[in-house]
Amino acid sequence: MTSAAAGSPVDGLLATASIVLSLLVAGWALVAAVRHRPPDRVQFAGLAVLEVGLLVLGVLALVAVGGGDRPGEPGAFFGYLVTLVCLPPLAWVLARMEPTRWGSAIVCAVCLVTPVVVVRLQQTWEVLGG
């Protein structure tokens, strides 16, 4: 990590926990999809917990920006931030609209995209110091 990343509000335990939780929910949803099962309560609970974590991550990032810190690529950073907090609710809505195995596949796909967006969010913050 660069020295700019050391003070990054989007790096650390919360980001790592979000990535791990997202991958766990993706794994659970993949098993359900392979077994031809619709989304279950565990998937929806995982999406809700993931959303809370991502909202906290977003608030920490906005507080840091309000405190004078600046991401390296502000436009991309805020785009990724908005996308990140919208992903779990989008998965929830689409999975509720598709109460078949494909609903579980939707949850799996969105939960596989979420870690990528978290990492991109971290990278857009770090560009300034790199």
Image (cartoon, rainbow, N blue to C red):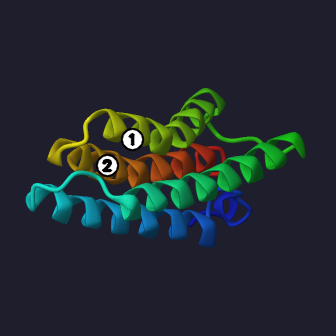
Q: Quadrant of residue 81?
A: top right
Q: Are marks 1 and 2 in contact (CB under 8 Å)?
A: yes
Residue plotted at (56% across, 51% down) = 51
**Residue 46: mark in rendering:** none
| Outermost top residue | 75
- Structural crowding at the residue carrying mark 1, measured as other residues with C-alpha within 10 Å and reported as few (<14), some (14–19) or many (≥20): many
* Left or right: 20 in relation to 8: left
* Left or right: 127 in relation to 96: right
**Residue 130 seen anywhere in this rendered image of the structure:** no
Residue plotted at (25% across, 42% down) = 99
* Left or right: 118 in relation to 104: right
Q: Nearer the viewer, residue 71 or 15?
A: 15
Q: Pinpoint residue 2: horizontal percent, then vertical percent.
A: 60, 63
Residue labelled with disc 2: 107
> Which secondary structure, mark 2?
helix
Q: Pinpoint residue 47: horizontal percent, then vertical percent.
A: 46, 54
> Which secondary structure, mark 1?
helix
Q: Quadrant of residue 115?
A: bottom left
Tell me the amino acid under the disc marked 1: Ala
- Structural crowding at the residue carrying mark 2, measured as other residues with C-alpha within 10 Å and reported as few (<14), some (14–19) or many (≥20): many
Residue plotted at (51% across, 35% down) = 83
**Residue 91: mark in rendering:** 1
